[in-house]
Image: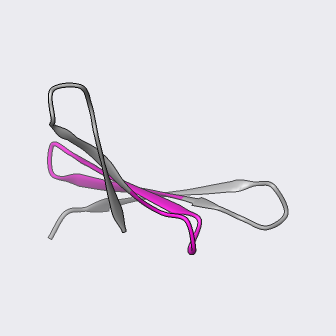
Amino acid sequence: MQDVRNALGKLVCRADRKLRRVEIVRKGQLTVLTFESNGTMRITNLPKT
C-alpha cells in the first residue's frame, strides 16, 4: 500500500494499484473502495479495529 498525503502532509488514504484498492480511515471507520475488473466499484464500510 502507498500512503497518499495532502499538501499539509496529513495522511488522506492508502492506495494499492495491484489490488485496485483504496482505504480511508476517518472517525474510527474504515472505508474500502475496490475497483472491479468489470468497471464497477465495491464500497465496504467497517469499524476500525
Residue at screen point 57% across, 74% down: 18
Q: Residue 15, relative to residue 12: is it above or below?
A: below
Q: Residue 10, relative to residue 32: is it above or below?
A: above
Residue at screen point 85% across, 63% down: 38
The image quadrant that residue 15 belongs to is: bottom left
Tell me the colour scheme of the image.
one colour
Specify whether residue 5 is painted magenta: no
Q: Quadrant of the C terminus?
A: bottom left
Residue 23 appears left or right of 41: left
Residue 47 appears left or right of 33: left
Specify whether residue 16 is painted magenta: yes
The image quadrant that residue 7 belongs to is: top left
Residue 46 is situated, as x and y percent measured from the top left of the image, at 32, 62
Q: Main secondary structure of the magenta part?
A: strand
Task: Report the number of discs.
Answer: 0
Residue at screen point 59% across, 65% down: 20
Residue 9 is situated, as x and y percent measured from the top left of the image, at 15, 35
Closer-to-camera residue (6/32): 6
Q: Quadrant of the N terminus?
A: bottom left
Q: Residue furthest right?
A: 38
Magenta stretch bounds: 15-33
Residue 40 is situated, as x and y percent measured from the top left of the image, at 76, 54
Residue 47 is situated, as x and y percent measured from the top left of the image, at 23, 61
